[in-house]
Image: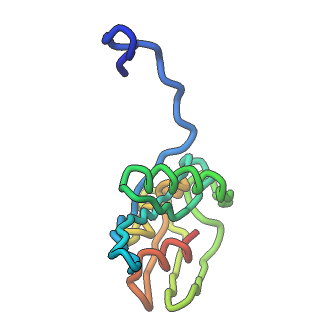
């Protein structure tokens, strides 16, 4: 960090972050108005502490960086706790339906790892699940699959 007054680096230690964050999707969206197109960005963000707590949110802003920051801030407000067995896997097999998205999540033996596709993998890893098998059925929409996993 730079100290604005003297132009020298500020070597004060940063506070450790409570949550890790991962951006799943960034979209450029437009709104038709009388004066033309209003361009803004949306960012789908997952936050988690890798100890059983995870949150998901969508941030919207005029530029990408602020959209991500808003997503992280909102994600921290939606944090839920996921029950973990031996701090590594889910307690039982689940079939989840959210809109057109269908997910199958199965607990796995130790050492299996996270066998999951894209957006589901991000949610499971940030929640602290280390051994799980999943299958995405239905839609491949990242938003639907993330919310279904969440």
Q: Residue at x 41, y 69 (%)?
A: 119
Q: Could you say where residue 121 lies in the image, as x and y percent from the top left?
A: 42, 65
| Rendered-image quadrant of the C terminus | bottom right
**Front one among 98 and 52:** 98
Residue 51 in the image: above or below residue 67: above
Q: Quadrant of residue 139?
A: bottom left
- Residue 139 horizontal side relative to residue 52, left or right: left
Give the colour scheme of this rendering.
Answer: rainbow
Q: Could you say where residue 99 lies in the image, as x and y percent from the top left?
A: 55, 89
Residue 62 in the image: above or below residue 145: above
Residue extending furthest front? 35
Q: Residue at x 35, y 68 (%)?
A: 39
Q: How many marks?
A: 0
Q: Could you say where residue 56 lies in the image, as x and y percent from the top left?
A: 55, 62
Q: Could you say where residue 118 lies in the image, as x and y percent from the top left?
A: 36, 69
**Front one among 24 and 131:** 24
Residue 148 in the image: above or below residue 125: below
| Rendered-image quadrant of the N terminus | top left
């Amino acid at each position: 960090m730079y100290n604005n007054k003297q132009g020298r680096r500020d070597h004060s230690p940063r506070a450790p972050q409570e949550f890790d964050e991962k951006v799943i999707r960034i979209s450029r969206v437009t709104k038709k108005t009388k004066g033309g197109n209003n361009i803004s960005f949306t960012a789908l963000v997952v936050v988690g502490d890798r100890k059983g707590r995870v949150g998901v949110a969508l941030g919207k802003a005029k530029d990408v960086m602020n959209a991500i920051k808003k997503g992280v801030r909102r994600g921290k407000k939606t944090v839920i706790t996921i029950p973990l067995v031996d701090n590594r896997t889910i307690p039982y097999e689940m079939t989840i339906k959210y809109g057109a998205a269908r997910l199958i999540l199965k607990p796995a033996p130790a050492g299996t790892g996270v066998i999951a596709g894209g957006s589901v993998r991000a949610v499971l890893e940030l929640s602290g699940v280390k051994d799980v098998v999943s299958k995405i059925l239905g839609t491949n929409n990242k938003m639907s699959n993330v919310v279904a996993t969440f």
